[in-house]
Amino acid sequence: MPAGDPRERAQPLFPHQPVAAAAGCAPPSIAPFAAFATADGHIIIAAGTDALFGKLCAALGRPALARDARFLTNDARAENVDALGAALRSRLEGARGAEWLTLLEAAGVPSGPINDIAGIANDPQIRARNMIVAIEDPQAGPLKLAGNPIKLSAFPDPTSRPAAPALDGDRAAILKDLKPRMNGDERR
């Protein structure tokens, strides 16, 4: 186990239980639910029910996989996850991620891209949720920062934010606002 692994830190809480192995994004009881390489990147596919697996196989142009005895049920797919992964990888590596995602979305198979930073910044959902905002900093110039992930319909969510004040920049205004509420000792 690598130093600093969260499992190492949690082990003293459960001294009589074995330390579970890291699973990454592929839970051991659902298959396929994993990241797969495509011709130009990676996508994640979550087709853990028999119906979704059938739709996945049809969308990939491999309907025979859904009839393969090793993959008939989720339990069978989880038992044969290595063979299933090899079969899916051999197909998925043959086309671009966007092409597969279009087919999988049309088939109703839960899936999505695994983005790099540029992909995240240009993702339509990131833009629609206002998750990257602009500020004009007097010293650094224009900057883009992470937006607030908490959205409440009763409050505006502007696409730009004011720059942070300089150190102690708002001190006088804050003290002026607080002074009427302070007792005599605090005013000094």
Image (tube, rainbow, N blue to C red):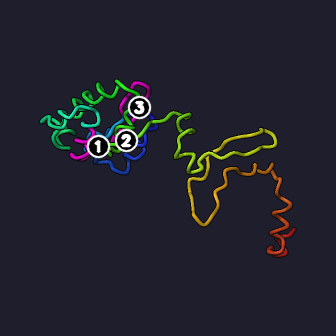
Residue at 31 percent across and 43 percent down: it is 107
**For residue 92, which quarter of the picture?**
top left
Magenta span covers which residues?
A: 36-57
Q: Is there any visible trace of residue 23 in the rendered image?
A: no
Q: Is residue 171 left or right of residue 35?
A: right
Residue hosting label 2: 111
Instruction: Choose between 1 and 165: the one closer to the eye.
Output: 165
Q: Is there any visible trace of residue 73 in the rendered image?
A: yes
**For residue 98, which quarter of the picture?**
top left
Instruction: Give the secondary structure at mark 2.
Output: strand
Q: Alpha-carbon distance for marks 2 and 1?
A: 8 Å
Of mark 2 and mark 1, the one earlier in the sequence is 1
Residue hosting label 3: 97
Q: Alpha-carbon distance for marks 2 and 3?
A: 10 Å
Of mark 1 and mark 3, the one earlier in the sequence is 1
Q: Is residue 37 left or right of residue 118?
A: left
Residue hosting label 1: 47
Badge 2 vs badge 1, beta-carbon distance below 8 Å: yes
Instruction: Give the secondary structure at mark 1.
Output: loop
Q: Is residue 58 above or below residue 126?
A: above
Percent x, y of residue 116: 51, 33
**Amino acid at the residue labelled 2:** Ser
Residue at 53 percent across and 43 percent down: it is 124
Q: Is residue 49 covered in magenta?
A: yes
Residue 186, label in figure = none
**Amino acid at the residue labelled 1:** Ala
Percent x, y of residue 71: 17, 37
Q: Is residue 52 left or right of residue 131?
A: left
Q: Residues within 10 Å of mark 2 (few under 14, many from 20)?
A: some
Of mark 2 and mark 3, the one earlier in the sequence is 3
